[in-house]
Image (spheres, rainbow, N blue to C red):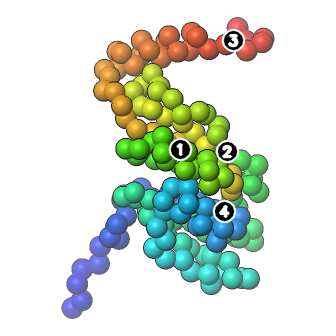
Amino acid sequence: MPGTVKAIPEGFHTLSPLIVVRDAARAIEFYKNAFGAELLNASADGPDGKITHASLKIGDSILMLTDEFPDWHCLGPQSLGGSPVTIHIYTEKVDEAFDRAVKAGATVTMPLQNQFWGDRYGQVTDPFGHKWSLAAHVEDLSREEIAKRAEAAFAAMPKKAGAT
């Protein structure tokens, strides 16, 4: 009898994102340049040579991706007008990682800075419409310290016109 098959394949974690992009081949190259992704596999066996599945390794995690397939209702953020999802990366060298993503073509949506919850944190949007946050944990804080800092941070934010 063959060996036991693992329910969670080697290298994967319980939760592994699968994203849909327009032009998966180009996205793979972007993720390699922006986040140091390593291509594990890619199957270009869809219509017109589209990628039906690819697996990339970023740090110790797997990111799966596929091309858009509108006939299957498989659409990425560019076709949907955006995405409410942010993919988060913790890394030791967050300043270098953030700069690398921007140099590769990501757009800064939240500058990298130290945040009230104890992370050095910033956000970018990739050329395919996916949002990414990059962070390094720089300070251990109690829930009470975070709440106090959050209150001060929100109080310092400009009020929107018409808000009560």
The kind of residue tagged 1 is Phe
User: x and y percent of residue 69 in the render?
Assistant: 71, 70
Can you name the residue that lies furthest to the bottom here?
A: 1
Q: Secondary structure at mark 2?
A: strand
**Mark 3 Cα-neighbour bin, 10 Å: few <14, some 14–19, many ≥20:** few
Q: Read off the residue under disc 1.
A: 98
Tell me how far mark 2 sits from mark 1, CA to CA: 10 Å
Tell me how far mark 1 sits from mark 3, CA to CA: 29 Å
Residue appearing at x 57%, y 50% in the figure: 101
* Label whose residue precedes the other's in the sequence (4 or 2): 4
Tell me how far mark 4 sits from mark 2, CA to CA: 16 Å
Question: With 129 as the anchor, is 120 left or right in this view?
Answer: left
* Label whose residue precedes the other's in the sequence (1 or 3): 1
The kind of residue tagged 4 is Val
Q: Secondary structure at mark 4?
A: strand
The kind of residue tagged 2 is Thr
User: x and y percent of residue 95 in the render?
Assistant: 48, 40
User: x and y percent of residue 145 in the render?
Assistant: 36, 15
Asked if residue 143 can be seen in this view, the reply is yes
Q: Secondary structure at mark 1?
A: helix
Residue 2 is marked as: none
* Label whose residue precedes the other's in the sequence (3 or 4): 4
Q: Read off the residue under disc 2.
A: 107
Which image quarter is the C terminus in? top right
Asked if residue 130 can be seen in this view, the reply is no
The kind of residue tagged 3 is Lys
Q: Read off the residue under disc 4.
A: 21
